[in-house]
Each structure stands twice: as C-alpha cells, then as structure tokens.
Amino acid sequence: MIVKHKLDALTSLRFFAAAMIVLTHAHPIFGSFGIAEAAPLGQGVSFFFVLSGFILAYNYRDFSKDGSIKRFLVARFARVWPLHLVTCIIWIGLIFHFDRTVYFGGETGALRLISNLTLVQSWIPLKLWALSFNGVAWSISNEMFFYLLFPMLIGLWSKHWAKLFFGATIIVAAFIWAGNSLELKSSDDYNGVSLLGTLYFNPLVRAFEFMFGIFLAKVFMTPAIHEFKTNAFGWLYLEIMSLGLVVVGMLLAGNPARIAGIFGTAAGYYFQREGIWLIWGLLILVFALSKGPIGKLLSTKPMVFLGEISFSLYLVHAIIITFIEPYTESIKLYGLVGYAAFWLVALFSSVLLYKGVEDPCRHFIMNAYDRRHPSTAVNFKSSYNYAASACAALLIIAVTTLHLNRF
C-alpha cells in the first residue's frame, strides 16, 4: 500500500501552467517575446485537467464510507465557488456596462449570469455563454462537471477502466468527426456553434484528459513504480527530458497543419488546443516520483506558495487584462516596465484573493460542514484571517465604486 505524501512539486507546476495562460492572454497588449506566437499556451488548461484527475484520484481512493460522496462534493464546491463568486463580482464592478433600463441587458443577460454562477456555462457549446462574465471561469465549469462524474468513475474504475477509456475516446472521436462533417468554423471570433464550443469548451470532450489523470494516479499508486531507483543525476535527466517533451509538444501543437491535412480541420484544432495530454501526464508522473534537484526546487516553500495562488491568478488575470485593454497604446509606451507592473498587480491581487477569500472560505465551509466548532461564531473566527479578508473586501468595494462612478 502506498502511503499518501504531499506532492509539492505538482503544486508548484500549477503556477507555471497558470503563467502560460496569463502570457497568452496578455500577449496582445504586452507581447510575449514571441512565445505565444510559436506555441499555443492555452494548452496549460489541459495540464490542469490532467492534474485534477490525478490529484483527486490520489486523495479520494474510494467512496465506501457513508456520506463520503456528499462530503467530496461539498469540498469541491468550497474549493472553487467562493473565489469564482468574488471574481465574478469584481468583473461586474470593473468591466460590465450596466444598462440603466434593463439591469442585465445586451449579450450577457440574466440567464447567462445564472449559468455562470451555477458553473454550467461551458456545458452550452456557445462562445457567448461559455465566456460570459469572467470568461476564464469556463474551465472551472468543466471541473464542476468532472467533480460530479468523479465518484462514479472511481466506483467503476477497478473493473471497467478500459471500457471507460474506450467510451471517452469514442466521444472525442465523435465530436471531431462531427466537426469535420459539419464543417464547423475554427475561428474564435464566430459566436455560433463552432469548434471552440464543441471541442475546446465541451466538458464531454475534455473529460478524457481528466480520466487520463485518474489513470496516471492509479499507476502512481502501484507499488512496482516506486521500486524504480536512481541517483540525483538520473532524476535530473528524467526531469529535463519531461520538460523538454513539453517544449517539443507545444511547438508541434503550434503547427497542426499536418494533422489537419490527414484527419481534417477539427482534428488539427483538437491537437493544437488540447492534444498534448500525454506529455502533460508524463510530466506529472515524473515530478510526482522525482527526487531530483528540479523537483526539490519546486518543493521549496516560495515555489509551493506560487502554486497555491495559481487558481486566484488564473481567475483574476483576465479581469485585469480586460480592464486595461482600452489603454493598450498608452501602456505599450512603458515597455517592459509596464509588463512588470502588470505582473506585480496580478500577483498581488492573487495573494490577496488567496489569503482573503479562497483559503479561508474553503476552511470555513468545510469546518461548518464537519461541525468541528460548537458555534458559527467560533467557526468564523478560526477560519478567517481578518486582515486579508478586510483587504479583499476593500478591493471589491474600491473597484466597484471606481467603475460605477463613470456613469
């Protein structure tokens, strides 16, 4: 039996995956030294989906205890929803243009807000739904779908994992076939049914990556794989090789023309946007096992902390970018100084949200659910860092007031 250990290196890798996504979204304003043009950095989302399956399967190995499924779902809700709610409020305060007659008028109406707050927006394969309000939240809508699926997958996995994988593969292939047959548009600017909605946002398609993460966790938990021994140089070699594969895979994904020429436009689109899941899986497995120098560096407290704030960074960065976008020409005059300032604001906001919202809200909800404290008041006091919570509240009030004062 494999004893559970903290996989700190994997936590740190989350920051780099989030940074990839920040780079690609910030590219139109600040550039990216050519990186975003050479490689589809949005593949970082695929890393998160594979890692999510891996970590959940590692931490939740069965649901045989009474109430374990319910507690799992509460834990997942506590993990993602409070921060999602707060960043949605910040988005509304900074970005949303209120209609004085119809409060939620225009393209992002009340129904889209409801779908966003209930985290089902990406289940509707249309750009204006999936990217409504704080657009990057589409991926946690997918995660919510995976969370609902996860207990069933774990229950069936030991006897039916091959059938589950086969079914997931058929679903991916079917949507690629449909994309080719229906000649769905590959342009991200199209608002109708397109490859963006049917292949990239679609949780039925992305569930394959999540399931691959579960498979890797099961491999990781077999005693045989832990019998592999090597020295520090051997681990360093494996670490460098896995990172090198990521670079090669990203560069190949940046030029999907060959795959599109053989298997159709939809297949090329799939490979470009989410097709290097195998490489992400190898990277995750290597750093879960590794005792090498890079793994040790990633396991240091500063690196782990960056990984811990990665979810906050992911949700807040697009708000900052959207807010400053009208001032692009002025910002470009500051060059690297402006880019550095953007990263400082993004990281500071991420720390604020992590310390003031994400972490304390998660503890508060789970403590309340587990009834660890005799009263709500004690529960609240034990869970919240008052200073950080106050800062987060002030941030929300400030940005909302700033925006509303424009009218």
Image (cartoon, helix red, strand yellow):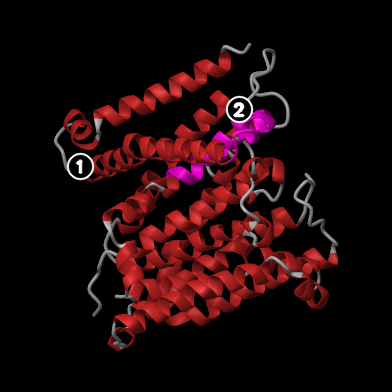
Would you call the spot at circle 2 few (<14 residues within 10 Å), some (14-19), or many (20 or more)? some
Q: Please state which amino acid type lies under the numbered disc 1.
A: Arg
Q: Secondary structure at mark 1?
A: loop
* Quarter the N terminus occupies: bottom left
Residue 190, given in percent of the width and then of the height, sits at: 80, 47
Mark 1 or 2: the one toward you:
2
- The foreground one among 180 and 339 is 339
Q: Which mark is residue 371?
A: 1
Residue 145 versus residue 322 in the image, above or below: below
Quadrant in the picture for residue 229 = bottom left
- Dot 1 or dot 2: first in sequence order is 2
Task: Name the residue located 42 percent from the left edge and 25 percent from the top edge.
Answer: 395
Q: Secondary structure at mark 2?
A: loop
Mark 1 to mark 2 CA distance (whole Å): 39 Å
Q: Which residue is mark 2?
A: 95
The magenta span reads 312-335
Q: Which mark is residue 337?
A: none
Would you call the spot at circle 1 few (<14 residues within 10 Å), some (14-19), or many (20 or more)? few
Residue 237 versus residue 322 in the image, above or below: below
Q: Main secondary structure of the magenta part?
A: helix
Residue 171 versus residue 93 in the image, above or below: below
In the image, residue 179 lies in the stretch drawn in magenta = no
Residue 257, given in percent of the width and then of the height, sits at: 78, 70
- Is residue 61 at least partly visible in the picture? no
